[in-house]
Amino acid sequence: MAGLITFILALLPIATVFVLLVVLAKSAKFSMLVAYLVTAATALLIWGTELNKVLGATVNGAVTAVSLLYIVFGAILMLYTLEESGGIRSIRAGFTSISPDRRVQAIIIAWLFGSLIEGASGFGTPAAIAAPLLVAIGFPAMAAVMVTLIIQSTPVSFGAVGTPILVGVRTGLADQQIVEATIAPMAFGDYLLEIAVKVATIHGLIGFLIPLILVGMLTRFFGANRSFAEGFRIWKFALFAGLAFTVPYYLIAATLGPEFPSLLGGIVGLMIVVPAAKRGFLIPRESFDFPPRRDWNDNWVGKLDDLEDHNAHKPVMPLVKAWAPYVFVVALLVSSPARSRRSRHGSPRPR
């Protein structure tokens, strides 16, 4: 009985968020404030946590929130700059030339480009960068957020150039006598590689289905017919796109280690899927689009949705120049985590 009460008390902060957000439909601002107060109260009164630790955790949370806010600020600033300069108009035209089908666009931007961004930086940046891009090319804001969060699964274990394994697993297992005794005579670096291969295997066996789940959810909740079947009609292309990422993802994990599966898997996937989509490979003739904007539910709409309505008079920027800021961002994301990780933890794969 005591164990059950402890479990309920430990679950209380999460349950508070669920009840307020989902059941009572309160605002996130109000719900998270109440959840914080509940968490702090249970930490102090139930678990006996020292006040200075609670205050320290509060400051740490505030700093983390600010860091996430400036990531989102940078992504939206870049988006509006591209919109005013005509870059978004060029990017939209580029995707339309690949395929006007919204299911295909979601797979390319959310699944492949989002996985690339996850592999380069992690920490929620795929949603911060890919979601506004989807909104800019005509997706409802809620649909853009949904699909970019759905892909936060397969690529995450190798996000930020392998940080979850190279930093997370190493921090928990390195220099532990019981671990060294268990894996002997294997070196710890080889053990990390073995972990990476097993993780990639599990993700590879399931992850290739993510694009299919993504398009099914997209058409079910944001299509005019509210139908899973509309999304599943593109199942051949969705599975093809899933395998185009997960196969190189696994091979890279098995050969190069945990640094690059998501990053290079996303790049290879884009190189395979984009030309195939442009040729209509495995794409049904019936294209899917969202209902007219006037028929959208109010809760679909975000503040970025009006971008599409103001681009007709904008100049047309060359497509290469329009994509250059995103290429530059990816290059910075690739280099920064690798440098910081190596400076803190040394060589990523000791032998």
Image (cartoon, helix red, strand yellow):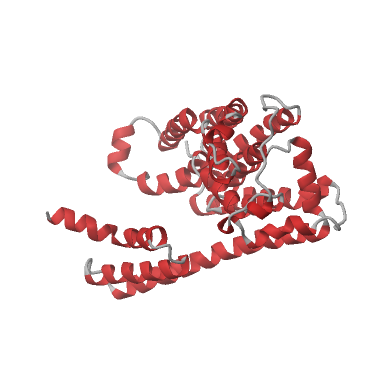
Image-based side of 190 in relation to 233, left or right: left
Q: Is residue 235 above or below residue 221?
A: above
Q: Residue 271 is drawn in which quadrant?
A: top right
In depth, the one of 75 and 166 nearer the eye is 75
In depth, the one of 206 and 218 nearer the eye is 218
**Residue 41 position in % (x across, y down):** 28, 71
Total count of labels: 0
**Residue 101 position in % (x across, y down):** 69, 37
Query: Can the viewer see residue 330?
Result: yes
In depth, the one of 332 and 102 nearer the eye is 102
**Residue 267 position in % (x across, y down):** 66, 37
> Which residue is depicted at the point 60% across and 25% down?
236
Image-based side of 253 in relation to 333, left or right: left
Q: Is residue 177 above or below residue 230?
A: below
Query: Can the viewer see residue 347?
Result: no
**Residue 310 position in % (x across, y down):** 79, 59
Image-based side of 312 in relation to 138, left or right: right
> Which residue is depicted at the point 80% across and 61% down?
84
> Which residue is depicted at the point 34% across and 58% down?
14
Name, please, the residue furthest toward the left: 1
Quadrant holding the N terminus: bottom left
